[in-house]
Image: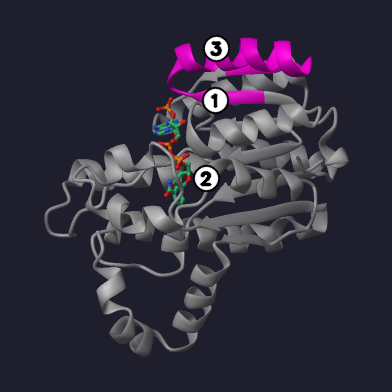
Amino acid sequence: MLVNHRIRNKVIAITGASSGLGEQIAYKCAQNGATVILLARTMKKLKRMKDDIEKKYSVACGIWELDVSQHENITNTFKEIYENFGIIDVLVNNAGYGVFEEAYTTSIVDIKGMFDVNVIGLMACTKEVIPFMRQKKFGHIINIASQAGKIATPKSSVYAATKHAVIGYSNSIRMELDPYHIFVTTVNPGPIATNFFQIADQSGTYVKSVEKFMLNPEHLADKIVNSMLTKRREINAPRWMNTGSIIYSLFPKLVERIGRKAFYKK
Ligand code: NAP
């Protein structure tokens, strides 16, 4: 187990905490002595996690029902969190989903849905913590993007567009917030073994072709938690996939030609 002493007694809010990567991050934070605030739509799951976390790790755990696509509810939720806990030291914007489909068949409902959750929801949550973090001159915003935010591949045009937006937004606010000693990290994973694919890849074809190199959400959560309250700019995993993204940024035409077969795995 990695240990991050910097987060002991700190307050860490995580969106999309009810499953997959968010759930693992929540457990790892609690294990390292942090107070955790869990946000998601599935309250039943959050209640179970709260009981388990408080019993196992003797830390405080707050839970709030929040659908980050309901932007008008976000301000109130964060107001309640600040009233109850006084501070948020680290915000992990993790809530997100993808629908893998070709651009022309993707419905406007799905396009808006992905942008509402992955982009506008993330920005709205971030806006709530910035004024407090600026005042304290302390804090860390961790945005879960994706390798899809670096290389866009067929059948994920909209999802990739949302994650490109997350990286662009993060790069801008990192500079804005630097004078206030607020860190901004993007996490750019390749495929992770979570429930994500139940929506993204309903046929199961993509999962079958990438399951050999799927990331373990627990290991990735360890890396993320270990980077908390450090100036880490990006977490990229797996490393070979990120090397591909770097080469792509230099030679996009070449990579699109050579990688064609691999890119059509969805
Ligand atoms: P997951 O197991 O499906 O978890 C997604 C989480 O997001 C759930 O807790 C879900 O909670 C929450 N969520 C979804 N829609 C929401 C909404 N409208 N409002 C609030 N919460 C919402 O998937 P995951 O793999 O852990 O995904 C976590 C993040 O990693 C996402 O941002 C995803 O894009 C990113 N990512 C995933 C992969 C992958 O291959 N799995 C790769 C790269 C990046 P509720 O349903 O309870 O609300």
Residue 153 percent across, percent down from the top left: 31, 67
Residue 158 percent across, percent down from the top left: 29, 56
- The residue indicated by pointer 2 is 123
Residue at 73% across, 59% down: 232
Residue 39 magenta-highlighted? yes
Q: Is residue 230 left or right of residue 113?
A: right
Name the disc covering residue 39, or none.
1
The stretch in magenta equals: 37-63
User: Picture quarter containing residue 149?
Assistant: bottom left
Looking at the picture, which amino acid does disc 1 mark? Leu
The vertical placement of 210 against 75, above or below, is below
Q: Are marks 2 and 3 in contact (CB under 8 Å)?
A: no
Q: Is mark 3 within 8 Å of ligand 1?
A: no
Q: Are marks 3 and 1 in contact (CB under 8 Å)?
A: no
Residue 46 percent across, percent down from the top left: 53, 17
Instruction: Identify the element where label 1 is drawn.
Output: strand
